[in-house]
Image (tube, rainbow, N blue to C red):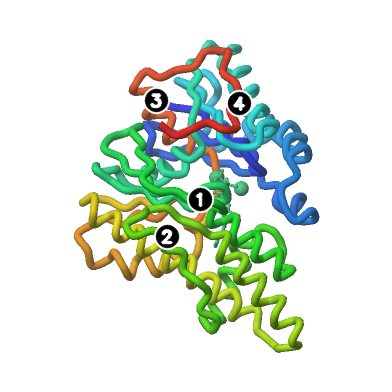
């Protein structure tokens, strides 16, 4: 089946065409990053306006690049949540319009399921598997016994990993989004400061990053007050070392406890060079398949929505035209 997929949950207007859940026919992403950078974060009203302006253009380009017309489509899919409600609504309404006008089935997709299924464009899933989701709004360990079946075994109790990156970057007066910038700086720094690692209670798969963020900010204030010199590279490296150690160790323990065949990494923070290296070091010589998406599938895109929609398509899970944006949609 050929599915046209739409993603507008945040600041990327994205449309893709995916065949059989695994083959990417086109993948167009119009990012608004440079617009929101001025404000140090995503401004919801501005995001919605740009989605409206970009939607038709991006959609036409996606069909063009796939060398298809709407007549070739078998279904239309869209991110229904979670995300910014105004941003989601633009995608949902665009999807409903195409589905209605062309009498196509409509599929609603969970954004985080999408991040996970981005990996299926690269390699087939083998169950049971564990997914480490690390994005701007989520940090979760998700256990899957079969397609479309998600059990959240651990999650952040405060900030998401990407959110911590963005907030620490802001405290260092670095541009938004902070993840890529801090990642780069960290490569040139050293873990001099040994910031705390939030292990939480024994055996917990949950995460917490707000204490780390506060520790970094306190250290910065302290050094400024005392007039001490520091290298931003070392702050970045020390912050990143804490994030990576906790993510890697908790994930490692969970894969052992659950005896999974695959570990799937998903979400914007999976673009992190240090995290990718640490995971490879930990898992490459183990009897477990490590899957990390290529960079273009780590951050928001519609290819991942099309990949997930294929599962819904085969399970006969369709929506009618009453489909609405659901900013707080739960997984599973
Ligand atoms: P969610 O998917 O939870 O709804 P989102 O869609 O905003 O949130 P993504 O687009 O998946 O999140 O990822 C964006 C986040 O990834 C930002 O917080 C950004 O700083 C972070 N990020 C991107 N690249 C890197 C990197 N190299 N290192 C660390 N973080 C990164
Ligand atoms: Fe995302
Ligand atoms: Mg984004």
Earlier in the chain: of badge 1 and badge 3, it is 1
The vertical placement of 329 against 180, above or below, is above
Residue 34 visible:
yes
Res. 312 mark = 3
> Helix or strand or loop: what does disc 3 sit on?
helix
Q: Residue at 60% of width from left, 37% of height from top?
A: 83
Q: Residue at 51% of width from left, 79% of height from top?
A: 194
Q: CA distance from mark 4 to mark 3?
A: 18 Å
Q: Are marks 4 and 3 in contact (CB under 8 Å)?
A: no
Earlier in the chain: of badge 1 and badge 2, it is 1
Which residue was labeled with disc 1? Answer: 157
Direction from residue 214 to residue 249 in the image, left or right: left
For ligand 1, tell me if the residue under mark 1 lies within 8 Å. no
Which residue was labeled with disc 4? Answer: 325
Which residue was labeled with disc 2? Answer: 200
Q: CA distance from mark 1 to mark 3?
A: 30 Å
User: Crowding near pointer 3: few (<14 within 10 Å), some, many (20+)?
Assistant: some
Q: Are marks 1 and 2 in contact (CB under 8 Å)?
A: yes
For discs 1 and 3, the disc positioned in front in the rendered view: 1
Q: CA distance from mark 3 to mark 2?
A: 36 Å
Q: Position of residue 27 (x, y in %)?
A: 53, 41
Earlier in the chain: of badge 3 and badge 2, it is 2
Earlier in the chain: of badge 4 and badge 2, it is 2
Direction from residue 98 to residue 18 in the image, left or right: left
């Amino acid at each position: 089946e050929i599915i046209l997929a739409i993603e507008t949950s945040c600041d990327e207007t994205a449309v893709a065409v995916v065949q059989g859940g695994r083959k990417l026919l086109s993948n167009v992403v119009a990012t608004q990053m440079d617009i929101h950078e001025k404000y140090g974060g995503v401004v919801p009203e501005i995001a919605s306006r740009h989605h409206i302006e970009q939607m038709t253009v991006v959609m036409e380009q996606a069909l063009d690049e796939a060398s298809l017309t709407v007549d070739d489509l078998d279904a239309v899919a869209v991110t229904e949540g979670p995300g910014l409600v105004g941003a989601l609504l633009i995608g949902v309404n665009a999807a409903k319009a195409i589905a209605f006008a062309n009498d196509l089935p409509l599929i609603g997709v969970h954004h985080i399921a999408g991040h996970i299924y981005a990996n299926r464009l690269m390699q087939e899933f083998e169950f049971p598997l564990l997914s480490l989701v690390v994005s701007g709004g989520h940090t979760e360990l998700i256990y899957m016994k079969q397609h479309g079946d998600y059990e959240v075994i651990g999650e952040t109790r405060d900030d998401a990993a990407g959110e911590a990156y963005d907030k620490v970057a802001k405290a260092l007066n670095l541009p938004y989004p902070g993840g890529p910038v801090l990642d780069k700086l960290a490569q040139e720094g050293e873990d001099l400061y040994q910031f705390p690692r939030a292990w939480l209670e024994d055996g917990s798969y949950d995460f917490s990053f707000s204490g780390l963020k506060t520790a970094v900010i306190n250290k910065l204030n302290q050094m400024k007050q005392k007039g001490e010199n520091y290298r931003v590279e070392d702050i970045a490296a020390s912050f990143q070392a804490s994030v990576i150690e906790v993510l890697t160790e908790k994930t490692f323990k969970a894969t052992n406890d659950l005896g999974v065949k695959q570990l799937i990494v998903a979400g914007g923070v999976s673009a992190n060079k240090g995290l990718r290296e640490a995971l490879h070091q930990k898992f490459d010589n183990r009897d477990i398949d490590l899957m990390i998406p290529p960079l273009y599938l780590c951050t928001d895109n519609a290819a991942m929505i099309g990949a997930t929609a294929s599962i819904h398509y085969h399970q006969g899970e369709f929506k009618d035209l009453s489909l609405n944006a659901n900013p707080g949609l739960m997984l599973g």
